[in-house]
Structure formats: structure tokens, C-alpha cells
Amino acid sequence: MNGSRIVAVGHYQPARILTNEDLAGMVDTSDEWITSRVGIRTRHIAGPDEPVDELAAHAAAKALAAAGLTPADIDLVLVATSTAVDRSPNMAARVAARLGIPSPAAMDINVVCAGFTHALATADHAVRAGGATRALVIGADKMSDVTDWTDRTTCVLVGDGAGAAVVEASGEQGIGPVLWGSVPEMGHAVRIEGQPARFAQEGQSVYRWATTKLPAIARGACERAGYAPEDLAAVVLHQANLRIIEPLAQKLGAVNAVVARDVTESGNTSAASIPLAFSKLVEQGRISSGDPVLLFGFGGNLSYGGQVVRCP
């Protein structure tokens, strides 16, 4: 085996839906103000009894079921998250315990909004190197836990959720080479820090960086996999803001691709946003098995990471 592939995906969102009208009753905002600036209409919010690992486990269980696998078939669990409350046990170990996965390697990866694509690349490398047979890769965040619900500039953006993928060895390259990096000197532009931890960002700085610097990097990820942007069947960018997603996709030049716009109904779910949106496209039948799909994350640390994958 000289490659790896995604064999199944799954996602999960909490039942509670918070609308723009609900937010207008909490802070000085309106549906028009939110939709015109970020394109978000609704978001799902987890309750106090729904921790991050529970969201992650629900998504992972769906991916396992879709793959026709059991927990015993998994020997590597990677969870991309930046909203873990405790340091140990980590989210990956907690998810493994919830699902009954015996003796896996279990690691968390914190690259904030680019976390899932980093975790997927790590799983690809581990499987191709023989360090794992099958990996469960999860992006899960409970952004509502780190949000100041009196700050109208941030509370309108966030949502909670999880998405997951099962990765296994393949004779073909089902997961393309990753293109990843960061701008550490600008790490202050997106932050989750303090006691209690709170999400904050410099919105204009992030917008300028995302819309001017990232299109060329996203094209580079396509080139590494041997694709031109017009060959893509779908583009799944980090679901940060519709005003970032649409110009970035346009500048990329993926003229024939379905562009994921799950941000409109899910908000910014950080590391969950890419697998969540990807899983929905698969579930809705908007992309077909074998289709080339660009996954591209960006955000906290001003990190980025992307790869072209084959749809399961």
C-alpha cells in the first residue's frame, strides 16, 4: 500500500438551534446585520451536559457505521480541537473510551480552525508509514464554552459540532499531499486565551489575509495532488464567514465545484467545520464517490492546511 483514503464520514450537531432573532434578544444586533456581514442564519449550541468528547463520539460512531467497521478495527484516534477543558485524559482518549476502542494511539491536535486538515494529514502519514492500520480522525469544538455572549462581534459567529472520517491504507492516493504552514508573528489575530478562556479576533486582519494570501496557497494544495482547480468536484473551506468563503473560492478558480456554505446554518464551528460540511455534502448526495474534493482549513495561529481527497 502506498497511499491512504477516506472510507466514510459522519457528523453531529446538538439539537438546540440559536437563530439570529434569538441573538437580537441577547445583544444589540439584528438578522440583517448578521447575514449581511457574515452570512450566518442559525447555529447549533450544546448544553452544559454535552462536552466536546460527546459531540466527537457521536460523529465518530456515525463514520464507523457508514464504513461498516467496529471500534476494534481502529488503532489510531486523532481529535482536532481547541476547546478541551481538561488537559488529561485528552479528547482522543475520552472518545476512544466512549466508543470502546481497545488500545489505540490517542492524540489531540490543536491547530484551531485548521485542525482537521492537520489531523487528516497526520493520519495519512501514519497509515502510509505503517504506524496505523485504520485511523479515526475527528474535528470537534464547543465554541459556545469560550464565547462572551455579551460581545456582539464574536457571539454571532460561533456554533458547536463535530465531524469525523475513517482513514485506511489504499493502493491509490485517496488523500493528496498536504500543504500546510502558518504566520506565527500574526498569531494574535485569532485567540482563545485568558481565564476563563475567551474567543477573540481581529476581523479585518483575518479577512485581508484570507482573501489575499490564501487563494494561491489553496491552488498549491491542488497542484501537489496533480489537479487543476477546475478539476475539483467540491471545495470545502473552513466555514468562518460567507464573506471569506465566496471570494476565496472564486479566486481559487474552482469553476465547476460545489462550494460548501454550511456556515449559513452552522456558524463557525472551528475544527469541526470542514468535516461537518464535507459529511453533509456526502449525505446530501451533492458529490459522488471518487470525486476530487479540496479540504482547506485556516484560522487560529494564522495556520493553514489543505489537501485534495477522494470522496468516499
Image: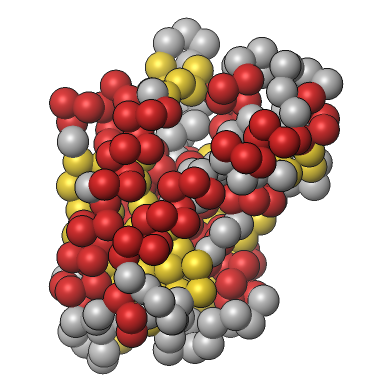
Q: Quadrant of residue 104?
A: bottom left
In front of the other: 303 or 124: 303
Q: Is residue 303 visible?
A: yes
* Residue at 71% in and 23% down: 29
The number of discs equals 0
Q: Quadrant of residue 185?
A: top left
In front of the other: 120 or 281: 281
- Establish if 52 lies above or below 248: above
Q: Position of residue 151 (x, y in %)?
A: 61, 15
In the rendered image, the residue lying farthest to the top is 195
Q: Quadrant of the N terminus?
A: bottom left
Q: Position of residue 136 (x, y in %)?
A: 44, 63
* Residue at 37% in and 37% down: 207
Q: Is residue 51 visible?
A: no
* Residue at 57% in and 40% down: 38
**Colour scheme employed for the rendering of this structure:** secondary structure
- Establish if 291 lies above or below 186: below
Q: Position of residue 69 (x, y in %)?
A: 55, 77
Q: Position of residue 95 (x, y in %)?
A: 54, 49
Position of 158 with respect to 295 (left or right) is right
Position of 53 with respect to 230 (left or right) is right
Position of 124 with respect to 17 (left or right) is left
* Residue at 33% in and 84% down: 231
